[in-house]
């Protein structure tokens, strides 16, 4: 594997003479081969300048040209071959099968956006034809399309080193919208980032796009990211990570002379509500399925089920017994980074030390940097008085809150902050009480699931991976699925502009063949 | 006319015992009849609590029910009759014809949103059916619809006491989305606000909606507005006014424990570019038309043409002569408030005192609170070095920047902040240089016009009344036209939710008969 560890500025590998750093092998804590160099202020500046130069050209490429580019990126990622998987395994501690699946997802979402581009609805094209004879005043010819907002800063996430990182969902949707991307590699997987970044740069070249369409910056710390978000040429930010990191970027973006939108996907404990009939009919089975979701990928998912709500009774006992039994057999898994492992251990220690919380089951103990899955219970009363119990413990730890009645379940839900998902486990006899909970859940979350868990976020047209603050910075959008393209678009209206000067999306003859609204009615 | 001057909290008129204040007659500066009382903190709290209570019910009314409600609001406004026009004339100084037109526009946009609701695309309904047999993993059933974001705070604008005020565009689009509204009346037209507020409350009652769907608060100062934006139950803010006011609300909203979106439409000088061939062919005629746009409504439009750019030469001389000649005959008009008149006079005095600026024409002098229209010139060089020249003077004052060549026009445009509109006056021979300017204009503005002026913002499907900061706080949306409904919606995904529990928009049988996407393809 050939890593050079340089920042990739508009396709050029730029070396820094100063201090260099290395990636850490997740399983061992040892340094991995290849030095990486943090971007200098001049490199951040240059990447943004090139992105800005590329913006006018890139945003006006045809949807077909951008679709072909996205497909070229997908192919270039596949062309890296097994080097990508092995380096990513070393850096993330995630197993091969998971990362092969994640690569498929990454490639799949790039291709999905190619389809979105070819379909053309993203233009939101609208035409209100002139009415020269209207009284008392004639109506001008009005035409609307969306355009790319400008260069986008994308922050790679540690927990999805492929699908939410350098060529992840934010990059794919920003590219689809026509926005150049300046990516900041997550320091936990710089080698993976370099390999993917070079694949993107190759696709930029082979698609004969301006080199500034993509740059990749490294930094083991936060300074490069701060500079990037503060750069006046950056028009929007995509981020997946901690609430502390996300809110810091929100603050920085809001305080700029020209504020910009930040799409940060942050923390969520994803409540799971076990309804009485389901619990009675199949408590143990739900418990077993729950453990599968809890321990998947060592629990390092934004959608990990961190909170279980149920009314006490034999059904819940069966659930706890089933979950406890299943958990016993689960091996500890390597966590993404020593820092994440440390934070997990601290979160677990705090729960162990909490007198209102009982540890009821755990998985097998593990070695260095491995997270031992663990399950706790507490009461609704304790949960409602101790706000620390609603904080996310990132990893395979979950808290079962036993409630005395449905009213207590509602009280706990009402006090929760915004979440990515909520799950209801229920049978037909549970429909009416579940119906009564839906309005509350709709206020709190971006996705409501029945008889499942939030892990496994399908890349689809109807997906919402988002939710009210602090699950995300902006509950009006999604970071997964085709709707994500809307984040990076803004509408522009053309009034009485001659056909020769109109963009193709709005020319009378509709040369792009896209769906449009004429006087509010859909055509094509 | 029967004004009580009370805050209207969920349909109830609540009187304060403390200090009361009166509206000012724009033309005379004298107090108008009827005392008004500022809302107490308890009233703000009560209005927000009622809005929050009404939210779940209101957002789940059928599109037909909300459409009928919007139509009832429109009818109730018309039912006020001439009292509304006469009070509004007194409070705003605007002439009858303008206010009758504005009433028509207000009613028209309420009815337009009724049409948007009946059409149903606003739901953005999407269905990705389950694929139980997909390998390696089955796909769940995924369904997406938008829901109302929550109670919205709407701030009335001084310059459109009907169309951008209590029942203006923000209220209409928020109601259409299913959001309860707590409106803060602009202190320049409290009587107008009360009449309209009571009309809305009447429509809430006749439509048997929860009373909390609408409240109206008064305050001659800023405290009530600040409380409103800080209330945890408020989910979004609509504002039209000064940059100072808008950015203060943005800051307040960003610093909340749960930040919320602010849609503030603020300042804009709306550059007008006079291209050479058009200038040569019809410079004088364009000058005359420009004066019409400049002086309309005493120049008190966000889209008022405040900046003219052209290359020096005989064409520009003809334009200036034509404009000067036309301006001479324009009478001074009463401005909206003594404060706005004072600010206009200060802005004009600063231009008069600027050695790099020449006053070249003016309209007729006026009486108390009347704005005398005035036209200035400067050079591109002076404009590029003196940032104060790019500041908006709200009223009928405009600055012609003479440029030595097309490059200077581009330099001036490049240094402008975000704007609502840009106009190009051009003939066919100007097409190529105009084409070269379009990418720059698209970066800067929300609407590009040819051979017209930005005043007269058509309420239509293809309208964008928005633009990059500081023209607005959020260039991704519009405050006029049907697209504005998107501001107050957010997507929610339903995964494997039984049909019986799905909202009507997503039920398999499509009982609402709305257009939906199935697997990304449009249906219906």
Image (cartoon, coloured by chain):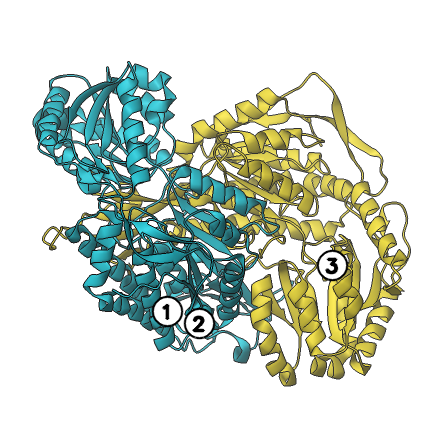
Chain colours: A cyan, B yellow
The N terminus of chain A is located in which quarter? bottom left
Label 3: few (<14), some (14–19) or many (≥20) C-alpha neighbours in 10 Å: some
Residue A120 located left or right of residue B254:
left
| Residue shown at the point (83%, 43%) measured from the top left | B27
User: Which residue is identified by label 2?
Assistant: A211
Nearer to us: label 1 or label 3: 1
Query: How far is disc 1 from disc 3 in space, using C-alphas?
Result: 40 Å
Label whose residue precedes the other's in the sequence (2 or 1): 1
| Residue at 8% in and 33% down | A329
The Cα atoms of the two marked residues, 2 and 1, are separated by 8 Å
Mark 2, residues whose alpha carbon is within 10 Å: few (<14), some, or many (≥20)?
many
Q: Is residue A75 left or right of residue B349?
A: left
Spatial separation of the CA atoms under disc 3 and disc 2: 34 Å
Residues A508 and A288: in front is A288
Q: Which residue is mark 3?
A: B390
What SS does tag 2 mark?
helix
> Marks 2 and 1: same chain?
yes
Q: x, y percentage for residue B194?
A: 65, 33
Q: Which numbered circle lies on residue A201?
A: 1
């Amino acid at each position: 594997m050939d890593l050079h560890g340089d920042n990739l500025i508009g396709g050029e590998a730029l070396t820094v003479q100063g201090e260099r750093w290395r990636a850490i092998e997740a399983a061992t804590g040892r340094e991995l081969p290849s030095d990486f160099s943090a971007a200098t202020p001049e490199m951040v500046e240059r990447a943004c300048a090139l992105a800005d130069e590329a913006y006018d050209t890139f945003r006006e490429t045809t949807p077909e040209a951008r679709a072909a580019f996205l497909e070229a990126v997908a192919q270039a990622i596949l062309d890296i071959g097994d080097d990508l998987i092995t380096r990513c395994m070393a850096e993330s501690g995630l197993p091969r099968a998971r990362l092969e699946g994640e690569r498929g997802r990454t490639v799949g979402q790039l291709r999905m956006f190619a389809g979105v581009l070819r379909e053309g609805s993203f233009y939101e094209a609208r035409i209100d034809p002139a009415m020269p004879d209207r009284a008392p005043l004639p109506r001008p010819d009005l035409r609307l399309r969306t355009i790319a907002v400008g260069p986008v800063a994308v922050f790679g996430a540690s927990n999805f080193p492929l699908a939410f990182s350098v060529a992840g969902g934010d990059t794919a949707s920003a590219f689809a919208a026509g926005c150049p991307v300046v990516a900041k590699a997550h320091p936990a997987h710089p080698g993976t980032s370099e390999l993917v970044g070079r694949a993107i740069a190759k696709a930029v070249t082979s698609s004969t796009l301006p080199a500034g369409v993509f740059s990749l910056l490294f930094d083991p710390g936060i300074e490069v990211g701060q500079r990037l978000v503060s750069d006046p040429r950056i028009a929007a930010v995509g981020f997946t990570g901690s609430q502390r990191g996300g809110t810091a970027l929100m603050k920085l973006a809001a305080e700029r002379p020209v504020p910009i939108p930040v799409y940060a996907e942050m923390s969520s404990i994803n409540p799971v509500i076990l309804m009485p009939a389901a619990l009675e009919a199949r408590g143990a089975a739900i418990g077993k399925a729950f453990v599968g979701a809890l321990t998947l990928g060592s629990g390092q998912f934004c959608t990990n089920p961190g909170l279980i709500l149920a009314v006490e009774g034999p059904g819940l006992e069966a659930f706890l017994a089933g979950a406890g039994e299943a958990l016993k057999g689960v091996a500890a898994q390597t966590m993404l980074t020593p820092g994440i492992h440390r934070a997990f251990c601290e979160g677990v220690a705090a729960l162990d030390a909490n007198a209102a919380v009982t540890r009821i089951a755990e998985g097998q103990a593990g070695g260095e940097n491995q997270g031992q899955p663990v399950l706790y219970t507490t009461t609704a009363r304790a949960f409602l008085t101790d706000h620390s119990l609603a904080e996310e413990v990132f990893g395979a730890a979950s808290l079962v809150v036993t409630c005395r009645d449905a009213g207590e379940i509602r009280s706990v839900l009402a006090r929760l902050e915004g979440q990515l998902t909520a799950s209801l486990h229920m049978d037909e006899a549970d429909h009416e009480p579940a119906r009564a909970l839906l309005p509350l859940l709709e206020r709190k979350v971006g996705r409501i699931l029945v008889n499942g868990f939030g892990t496994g976020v399908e890349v689809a047209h109807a997906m919402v991976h988002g939710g009210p603050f602090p699950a995300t910075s902006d509950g009006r959008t999604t970071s997964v699925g085709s709707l994500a393209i809307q984040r990076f678009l803004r509408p522009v209206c053309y009034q009485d502009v001659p056909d020769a000067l109109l963009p193709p999306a709005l020319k009378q003859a509709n040369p792009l063949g896209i769906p449009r609204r004429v006087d509010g009615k859909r055509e094509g």
